[in-house]
Amino acid sequence: MNTLIVYATKHGCSEACAKMLSKELAGNVELFKLKAELTPDLTEYDRVIIGGSIHMGKIQKEVQVFCTRNMEMLLDKKIGLFVCGMLFEKADEELNNSFPKELLTRAMAKEFFGGEFKFNKMNFVDQLIVKKAAKINNDFSQILDENIKRFAALMNSDC
Ligand SMILES: Cc1cc2nc3c(=O)[nH]c(=O)nc-3n(C[C@H](O)[C@H](O)[C@H](O)COP(=O)(O)O)c2cc1C
């Protein structure tokens, strides 16, 4: 079973979660960080897991473009979808707004993995937004390990 985890990240949290997830998955697992100009070759993978983080209510554009560009191929794969974010009360809404319906309905696993605020990785504007909106002034991590494990168990269930 070959799995590719495709992700986008702004401050490194989705990358950390993708790596944590990769350790829980059965079979061969590879990671691919999405960049505007680069598209992975999906042909050799049975499972494709797509993830990213929510900033100002939206997942990264790279994730949206990846899903649209590769939809035909993705519909032939086992799919998993995850988002990182800090608005726990909006977890379901953010997850459902981040991916096309065709993928959401076919996904074997979809989860909100929580998130973190790391001030040394943020630019000045992001720091200001977090301080004002979230009223948080120091690094804070709330990655949901149990959600990552549950996601992996679902993905592994037909291996
Ligand atoms: C400027 C800014 C805006 C954010 N907006 C949202 C948001 O709308 N919803 C949410 O759930 N989390 C929001 N977050 C929290 C991020 O999703 C969280 O920090 C996440 O861990 C970032 O993941 P990344 O490092 O992979 O980009 C925001 C964070 C920043 C810095």
Image (cartoon, rainbow, N blue to C red):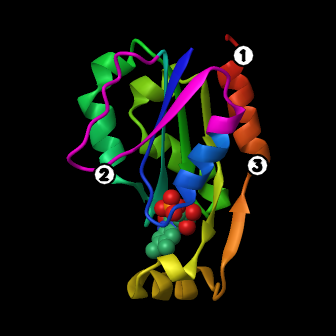
Say whether marks 2 and 1 touch (CB < 8 Å): no
Mark 3 is surrounded, within 10 Å at the Cα level, by few (under 14), some (14 to 19) or many (20 or more) other residues, namely some
Observer-nearest of 70 and 91 = 70
Q: Earlier in the sequence, mark 2 or mark 1?
A: 2
Cα–Cα span, label 3 and label 1 = 18 Å
- Toward the left, the furthest residue is 37
Residue 93 appears in the picture as rendered: no
Amino acid at pointer 1: Ser
- Helix, strand or loop at label 2? It is helix
Number of the label disc, if any, that sits on residue 145: 3
Residue at 51%, 61% (x, y): give it: 12
User: Measured from the top left, where is residue 43 in percent x and y?
Assistant: 34, 16
Magenta stretch containing residue 36, yes or no? yes
Say whether marks 3 and 1 touch (CB < 8 Å): no
Residue at 46%, 78% (x, y): give it: 122
Amino acid at pointer 2: Lys
Please state the total of marks drawn on the protein image.
3
**Ligand 1 within 8 angstroms of badge 3 C-beta:** no
The C terminus is located in which quarter?
Answer: top right
Residue located beneath label 2 in the image? 61
- Helix, strand or loop at label 3? It is helix
Cα–Cα span, label 3 and label 2 = 26 Å
**Ligand 1 within 8 angstroms of badge 2 C-beta:** no
- Helix, strand or loop at label 1? It is loop
Q: Earlier in the sequence, mark 3 or mark 2?
A: 2
User: Measured from the top left, where is residue 90 in percent x and y?
Assistant: 60, 56
Observer-nearest of 134 and 121 = 121
Q: Give residue 77's quadrant in the image.
A: top left
Mark 2 is surrounded, within 10 Å at the Cα level, by few (under 14), some (14 to 19) or many (20 or more) other residues, namely some
Magenta residues span: 22-45
Q: Give residue 68's quadrant in the image.
A: top left
User: Measured from the top left, where is residue 154 in percent x and y?
Assistant: 70, 24
